Image: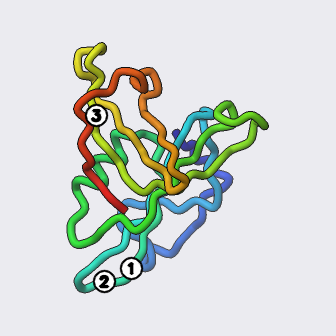
Amino acid sequence: MFVSLSDFEFPLPAELAEPGSHYWRAVELSLNSSWFVATLCSTGEDQGYRRTMLVSWDTDLVQILENMIGGYLEALLFMAPPWHSADGQWRTHPIKQIWRAYDAERDNEPALIFTTSEGGSAVIPEKSAENCLNACRDFRI
């Protein structure tokens, strides 16, 4: 998850701010776990308007994608934490497809399979990687 610290809040004038929103110059990761950068592009009146979101939970990502009205997912990055790589550094993986799957050995617990542009894949939650059956593609970028 992301942590916002009051020292980094940006005092945007009320006439420019979205109601109920707060603006931050920096946020901190509370855990070294995977997260996503989703770029959404609007169609219709605001055609071409891009909105980039930092999303820490896969379930929130699916909710955002399922509830998009008048737009589409333009790009998605999977941010893999340091413990995922041999050199202990963060890695960015562009996602091309998202598949919804269910872990048959965990009472059909939902899982997501992300296919990267490099041809690799990631399964969230990772404990379901070996057991996912009946995967179906939900989103294509």
Secondary structure at numbered mark 1: loop
Q: Mark 3 falls on what kind of element?
A: strand
**Around disc 1, counting alpha carbons within 10 Å, would you say few (fewer than 14), some (14 to 19), or many (20 or more)?**
few
Q: Quadrant of residue 60?
A: top left
The three-letter code of the residue at mark 3 reads: Ala
Q: Is residue 88 above or below residue 99?
A: above
Q: Which residue is mark 1?
A: 49
Name the residue: 28% across, 23% down.
109
Alpha carbons under labels 1 and 2: distance apart: 6 Å
Q: Residue at x 41, y 22 (%)?
A: 130
Frontmost of labels 3 and 2 is 3
Q: How many angstroms separate mark 3 from mark 2 (CA)?
A: 34 Å
Counting from the top left corner in percent of width and height, residue 14 is at 44, 73
Q: Are marks 1 and 3 in contact (CB under 8 Å)?
A: no
Mark seen at residue 46: 2
* Classed neighbour count for the residue bearing mark 3: other residues with Cα under 10 Å, few (<14), some (14–19), many (≥20): many
Residue 95 position, x and y percent, is 46, 54
**Residues at marks 1 and 2 touching, judged by CB atoms closer than 8 Å:** yes
Q: Nearer the viewer, residue 38 or 9?
A: 38
**Sequence order check, earlier mark of 3 and 2:** 2
- First in sequence, mark 1 or 3: give its number: 1
Q: Position of residue 77 (x, y in %)?
A: 51, 55
Q: Which mark is residue 101?
A: 3
Relative to 69, say whether 113 is above or below.
Answer: above
Judged left or right of residue 70, residue 50 is right
Residue 110 occupies which quadrant of the picture? top left
Q: Is residue 48 above or below residue 27?
A: below
Residue depicted at 37% across the width and 60% down the height? 20
